[in-house]
Image: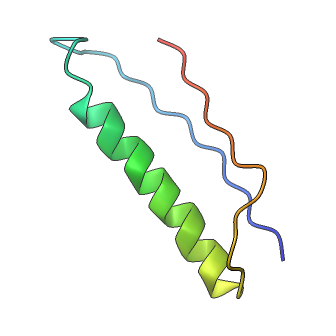
Amino acid sequence: GLVSAKSVKLIERISNLEEPEGRDAWWTEIRMEVRSHARALGCNVVLGYKEEISI
């Protein structure tokens, strides 16, 4: 099987760019979702995973 995910998050108002907790939580949620879908398909590994960020 194939699991594919693409997500875009627009952050319009950030009071302090030095506090990345919100972004970290969002990335963690995406990672957990990819793993969950892979497990649902019976896969035990995720290949070709890539993260990109533009600020």
* 22 to the left or right of 4: left
Q: Can you say whether 41 is above or below 22 in the image?
A: below
Quarter residue 15 falls in = top left
> Residue 50 at what x, y percent from top left?
68, 40
Horizontal side of residue 23 vs 38, given as left or right: left
- Residue 40 picture location, percent across and down: 62, 85
Depth check, front residue: 5 or 31: 31
Colour mapping: rainbow
Give x and y (percent) for residue 27: 43, 43
Relative to 36, does residue 42 appear above or below in the rendering?
A: below
**Farthest front residue in view:** 45
Residue in view at x 66 percent, y 74 percent: 38
Q: How many marks?
A: 0
Which residue sits at x=34%, y=33%?
Answer: 23
Tell me what residue is drawn at x 72 percent, y 80 percent: 43
Quarter of the figure with the N terminus: bottom right
Q: Residue furthest right?
A: 1
Q: Residue at x 44, y 25 (%)?
A: 10
Tell me which corner region of the image, top left, top right, bottom left or bottom right, holds residue 2.
bottom right
Dividing the picture into quadrants, the one containing residue 22 is top left
